[in-house]
Image: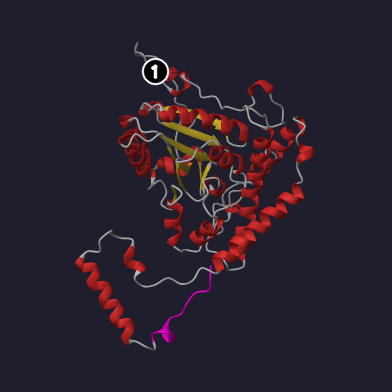
Amino acid sequence: MAPNTSEAAVDLDAPWISQEDLPVETYQIIDEDGTYDSADVPDLADEEFLDLYRWMLVEKRYAERMIKLQRRGQMGTVGSSRGHEASIVGSGYALQDGDWLLGMGRETSAMLLRDVSLRDIILFWRGVEDAQRFLTEQNCMIGISVGGYLPMTTGIGWGMNLTDSDSVVTAHFGDGATSTGAFHEAVNFAGVLDAPAIFYCQNNQWAISTPFEKQTNANTIAQRGLGYGVHGIRADGNDVLAVYDAMREARKLARAGHPVLFEALTYRTEGHSTSDDPTEYRERDAVEEWLERDPIERYESFLKSEGLWDEVDKDALVAEVDEEFSAAVEAADEYGPRDVDELFEYVYDDLPPILQEQLDEMERELAELDDLEAYIERRPKG
């Protein structure tokens, strides 16, 4: 694609504009080599700095353990979040009680920070739809349809305005979702409605096998906010402090009636999901380059510089996280099969007559077929 610059328009004396006229910088606090200016560091207590580290370990071990479960046939297809730890934790840590989080499936620790049960996350990836109901009790939801839930984000924000809520709604999505019509409709309408919404794009630079530069001629995702009249920011998604700090400010803007398009620049170091083989479409050298920018290792260097590393027992933390994960798997295994009437229960508040007739018919047929169980092939858990 040709560069989009105003220099090409030389024959017409007019105020052309292009993306080169407003370059977008990437907000960063901790450099790739671990250096930082102390004056830029967010005002957090030592316990909070350490807590950020623990949550990144939670995200890392969750991804590793989930993939192992999937390989053993105990889990459906899952998407790894390796490389996204800072992007996920930093954004989730800045939210407050009552805020909503709509996700794409790569923000587990951010949802755990909202008091979602790890058991329910595991149930979701096993295809148990009850999990969505449990997630909504904590103002969370996972939307598998790429970008399809983004208009709901605007709707929730609009509802917050109508009810004088002091909360915000944030939606996590990948760079691929920004190529959907739902994304454009959601952000545009949020700007019109002054919705307290944060559209949080984890730009890992790959929409499955399509690289970012083949999705758009825009230099960044953040700059698109200008077209909708909303605020935009691009942060280093591998710098947990930069993400946290920028997200905290984004929340203030959203509460003031200024929706935010937030781009966290990171990299997906593994496949899009356990059904994906990334070696078919990208070079290993690029992956190795980003592995050297590991967000957890970068933050470890910060903790060492701040004199906090001596308070970290990494092995003990990992063992603690593994124990919690194992307990969640056990709880998910104990979750029993569901009743037939649950197929109808969550469609309407009051079941319409036509659906009531269908439910009654199904129950009659099941009662008449005493030997039906012999003809049902039940898949194992996962």
**242 vs 380: above or below:** above
Q: Name which residue lies at 66% across and 32% down.
A: 45
Q: Name which residue lies at 42% across and 84% down.
A: 373
Tell me if 85 is positioned left or right of 19 in this view: right
Q: Residue furthest right?
A: 310
Q: Name which residue lies at 47% across and 21% down.
A: 20
Q: Residue furthest left?
A: 353
**106 vs 345: above or below:** above
Q: Name which residue lies at 44% across and 17% down.
A: 7
The amino acid sitting under disc 1 is Ala
Q: In this picture, which residue range is highlighted in magenta? A: 372-382
State whether residue 143 appears in this view.
no
Q: Can you tell which quarter of the image residue 152 is in?
A: top left
Tell me if 63 is positioned left or right of 178 in this view: right
**Is residue 353 located in the magenta-colored stretch of the structure?**
no
Q: Can you tell which quarter of the image residue 255 is in?
A: top left
- The residue tagged 1 is 9
Viewer-proximal residue, 370 or 72?
A: 370
Viewer-proximal residue, 289 or 76?
A: 76
State whether residue 231 appears in this view.
yes
Residue 137: horizontal and vertical position, in percent? 43, 52
Viewer-proximal residue, 284 or 314?
A: 314
Q: Can you tell which quarter of the image residue 64 is in?
A: bottom right
The rendered magenta stretch, by its main secondary structure, is classed as: loop
Residue 90: horizontal and vertical position, in percent? 58, 37
**Is residue 374 located in the magenta-colored stretch of the structure?**
yes
Residue 267: horizontal and vertical position, in percent? 59, 42
